[in-house]
Image (cartoon, helix red, strand yellow):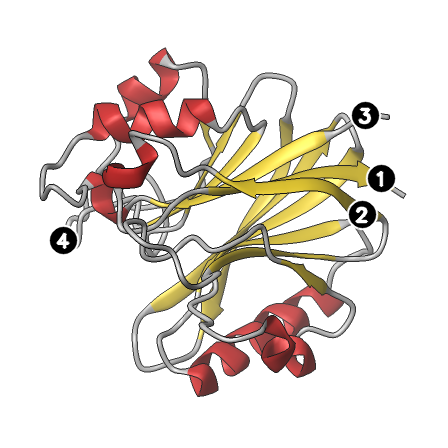
């Protein structure tokens, strides 16, 4: 059965628990995930013009392609969200989704051609307050209703400390799959980093990458999920 691995990783701007900014270390973690699609959060530095924390040439040297979401010059992503692809995954269309809330937030959307067929991947980094997380997820599901049906994955840092069923009302038609506890990296107690799947997709494996250097490269551990079509 054909599988596709998608990973999500909050880079924390490539600053590790040792307070060193080490893009090379972050890239080692990304490679170790062995994913065809990698969704990133906090991929750019904080201050304008928000240059990429993970350099483009380093990404390309390690066999990944950066998805273009019309980000400002020098930025890897949009609102810090970025997406990397391996060879064999092709881009059909990209878009950005504005998200409401107290903090500037946005989601990225890519329509991909994959070994599973057409696949829609949405990268998110939701707000710190549940009220705004629900509003932001509702904005995403409204945007999805305007699009042709397609198997869809939401991937990212949902910032939800409790069970994901608290978000179900805002995500009709999507089922959450938690790979495990990913935050804080030194002693994970919360599944902040997660996935949500639409009909047509099933998770056959999942996990959290906890071995070094992932354990020190960011305050989040990266997570992954293996998908099959159903």
- The disc label shown at residue 48, or none: 4
- N-terminal-most mark, 4 or 1: 4
Q: Pointer 2: what residue? A: 201
As measured in the structure, the alpha-carbon distance from the residue carrying label 3 to the one carrying label 1 is 8 Å
Which quadrant of the rendered structure holds the N terminus? top right
Q: Which quadrant would residue 224 be assigned to in this image? A: top right
As measured in the structure, the alpha-carbon distance from the residue carrying label 2 to the one carrying label 4 is 38 Å
Q: Pointer 3: what residue? A: 2
Left or right placement of residue 74 versus residue 200 in this view: left
Cβ atoms under marks 3 and 1 closer than 8 Å = yes
Cβ atoms under marks 1 and 2 closer than 8 Å = yes
Position in image of residue 7 (x %, y %): 53, 39
Q: Pointer 1: what residue? A: 229
- N-terminal-most mark, 3 or 2: 3
As measured in the structure, the alpha-carbon distance from the residue carrying label 4 to the one carrying label 1 is 41 Å
Cβ atoms under marks 3 and 4 closer than 8 Å = no
- The disc label shown at residue 44, or none: none
Cβ atoms under marks 4 and 1 closer than 8 Å = no
Q: Secondary structure at mark 1?
A: strand
Which quadrant of the rendered structure holds the C terminus? top right
Left or right placement of residue 24 versus residue 29 in this view: left
């Amino acid at each position: 059965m054909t599988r596709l691995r998608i990973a999500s990783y909050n880079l924390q701007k490539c600053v590790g628990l040792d307070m060193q900014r080490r893009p090379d270390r972050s890239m080692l973690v990304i490679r170790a995930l062995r994913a065809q699609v990698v969704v990133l959060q906090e991929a750019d530095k904080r201050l304008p013009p928000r240059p990429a924390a993970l350099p483009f040439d380093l990404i390309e040297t390690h066999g990944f392609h950066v998805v273009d979401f019309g980000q400002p010059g020098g930025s890897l992503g949009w609102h810090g969200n970025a997406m990397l692809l391996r060879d064999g995954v092709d881009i059909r269309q990209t878009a950005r989704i504005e998200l409401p809330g107290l903090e500037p937030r946005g989601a990225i959307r890519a329509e991909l051609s994959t070994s599973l067929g057409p696949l829609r991947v949405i990268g998110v980094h939701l707000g710190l307050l549940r009220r705004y997380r629900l509003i932001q997820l509702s904005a995403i599901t409204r945007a999805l209703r305007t699009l042709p049906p397609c198997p869809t994955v939401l991937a990212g840092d949902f910032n939800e400390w409790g069970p994901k069923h608290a978000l179900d009302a805002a995500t009709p038609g999507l089922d959450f799959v938690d790979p495990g506890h990913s935050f804080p990296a030194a002693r994970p107690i919360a599944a902040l980093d997660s996935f949500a799947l639409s009909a047509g997709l099933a998770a056959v494996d999942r996990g959290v990458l906890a071995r070094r250097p992932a354990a020190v490269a960011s305050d989040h551990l990266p997570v992954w999920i293996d998908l099959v079509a159903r």
